[in-house]
Image: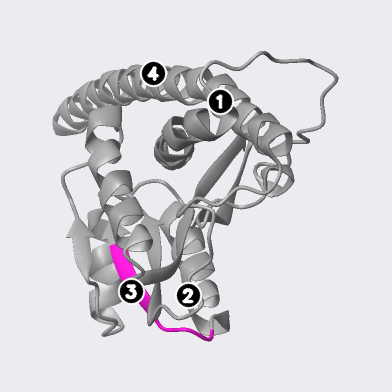
Amino acid sequence: MAKARQIVKRRKAVTNIRKITKTMQLIATARFQKAYSLATATKPYTKKITQLVGELSQSQGQIDHPLLRENPDAPKDLLLVLTSSRGFCGGYNANVLRKAIAHLNEHVRPSELHVVGKKGNIYFRFIRREVARAILDIDDRPRFDQVEPIATELMRRYEAGELGAVYVTYMKFISTGRQAPDVIQLLPIPKPETVEGQATSTTAQYDFSPEPAELLKLLLPQTVKVRLYQSFTDAAVSEQ
């Protein structure tokens, strides 16, 4: 009888585990779909604003703007690393951190380190690498109003000559079966043909109002904000 009771108890335990894992699967699927929808929805806008900035730049010729200008005399660069605050996502954080360390080791100029997510901050504290800013209030559902102040502060410091360049290390989302750690140059804004591999040559003719130079004053900061936000949404869907 005791053995029979143990079998019944075990069957109930297995049934409960099945219910729990099924619920976890449904929640994970829903979270992934939300993150996927957000990441894919922002890509066309990011692509188009990058293309438009390139076409405006070409029509204007040689442009002088603080976000395009290099700062060779700046004392340091800045690296922003996007990691998660939770585990259970395989080699996600390890691959991003490995990419970040490789970038830091290959870089000649000192880099100020800003890290998003608990996992990244724990890792850099473990290896005794100073983190200038730990960002822990952005979860796996980033909002534009959370990312925009970060981009604005980075642009302010870059325009003031405090930083020679700003880079972002994150997990780039390619497809549901493929993600790859990547480092992008956020500032100075790279030449249009090097941003996301987008060609900027076009046969389209534009009538500008106001003039292209005036439009670029508005579009260049927006491009920085959008590209940074795309990095956050890519990282979020890659984590899921």
Residue at 47%, 57% (x, y): give it: 169
**Of 183 and 174, the residue lying toward us:** 183
Residue 110 counted in the magenta span: yes
Inter-mark Cα distance, 3 to 4: 33 Å
1 vs 4, front mark: 1
Residue at 41%, 78% (x, y): give it: 74
The numbered disc on residue 34 is 4
User: Magenta region: which residues?
Assistant: 108-114
Residue at image mark 3: 112
Element under disc 2? helix
- Going from N to C along the chain, the mark reached first, 3 or 2, is 2
Spot occupied by residue 63 in the image (x, y as percentages of width and height):
61, 47
Picture quadrant where residue 49 is located: top right
2 vs 4, front mark: 2
User: Quarter holding the N terminus?
Assistant: top left
Spot occupied by residue 27 in the image (x, y as percentages of width and height):
31, 20
**Of 7 and 44, the residue lying toward us:** 44
Residue at image mark 2: 101
**Of 37 and 16, the residue lying toward us:** 37
